[in-house]
Amino acid sequence: MSTVEDLEPIRSRLARLRRAHTPADVAEAMRAEGRVVSDAALVDTLEQLHRHSVGAGPLEVLLAEPGVTDVVVNGAEQVFVDRGHGLERTSVRFSSEAEVRRLAQRLAASVGRRLDDAVPFVDARLADGSRVHAVLGTLADPGTCISLRVPARRSFSLADCVRSGSLTPGAAELLARVVESRLAFLVSGGTGSGKTTLLAALLALVPPHERIVVVEDSRELAPAHPHVVRMEGRPANSELAGAVTLTDLVRQSLRMRPDRLVVGEVRGPEIADLLTAMNTGHEGGCGTVHANSSADVPARLEALAALGGLPRLAVHAQIASALHASVHITRDGQGRRRVSEISVFTRDPATGITRTEQAVAFDADGTTRLGPGGPRLERMLER
């Protein structure tokens, strides 16, 4: 089988043609390089040229595997894959740091993004919906790093989440009531915990006559719902112009008559506009946020809202008025994801600071425990 180094002389000859090459051109280039041109050798060379010039190159075989959610590359020697049970090292290798760099630059170029020593990192969505993040070896050790997030090949329902063990039947029933009651909620958790998957499953429960407007930094949410408008932010170009932020999109979405306003992931000053929207008649809004626990969500929102210029007490007043519940997902050491608790937001009248109060906890053994916030959550659901 041809290696990347073996292909370079042939690739150079084909590049000088200044047109799309044919199998006959490849055979001629092989002869010019002193190669034996058998049917098998020609087919192998054609396959290798295709593999290393389109798509994700050596990573394609991993991305095509069922159940793969992430593929990460740490330089030429370390390639990992996540099949839903945490990162596992694979046998895939690159021949050199240069090959990894070329792949990263080709992926960036395929969506019109620049990746070189002047702009050594990129975060973008590929044409197939995959999200790519790359950092060149000038900044990272052990070399150029590539992270690929694979979009879900199908939408997961709440019943699917129950079958996979992410939800207990009781938790699924309670979350369905949260959606039906038009409570405003956030799904919290760490990276790769399944926040987006759960949110999409919950949005599928929204009545079909309601209009859902989804705002995301990178398009990931694809709920199984007949009336969804999905808007995606855009980074600045190489001239630092043309950026469209989530704050811009949240403001535009308010003029689009949303019945449910959804921010795929709250990560910046757009939280200020989202909270304002939820406080002005837009019920049933929701989103996801990175947090280590439900108890950490108010502090996380406070930090993000500060980027939007909201003072601390104003933020907490907005949170208490706009948000009803927080749904937290944990991921254990074996990579298993599950909803661990639902909490409600409460505001201390003495200090004005908002905190979360556990309403229901779902233990790993399937046990359900009511917390001090349980009666308050039930009252909100009944109302």
Image (cartoon, helix red, strand yellow):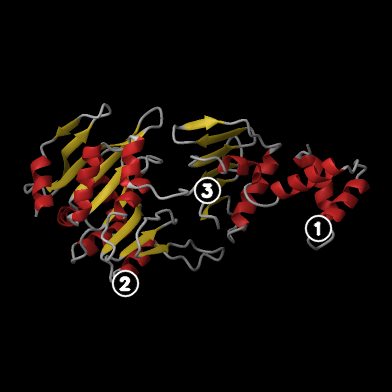
The answer to the question of whether label 1 and label 2 lie on touching residues, with beta carbons closer than 8 A, is no
**Which element type, helix, strand or loop, lies under badge 1?**
loop
Residue position for label 3: 133
Of badges 2 and 3, the one in the foreground is 2
Give the CA distance from mark 1 to mark 2.
48 Å
Circle 2 Cα neighbour tier, 10 Å, few/some/many (<14 / 14–19 / ≥20): few
Q: Amino acid at mark 3?
A: His
Distance of mark 2 from mark 3, alpha carbons?
31 Å
Residue behind mark 2: 256
Does any portion of residue 117 appear in the rendered image? Answer: no
Quadrant of the image containing the C terminus: bottom left
Precedes in sequence: disc 2 or disc 3 = 3
Residue at left offset 24%, top offset 64%: 277
SS at circle 2:
loop
**Is residue 86 found left or right of 51 in the rendered image?**
left
Q: Residue at x 40, y 50 (%)?
A: 155
Q: Quadrant of the N terminus?
A: top right
* 3 or 1: tag closer to the N-terminus: 1
Q: Amino acid at mark 2?
A: Met
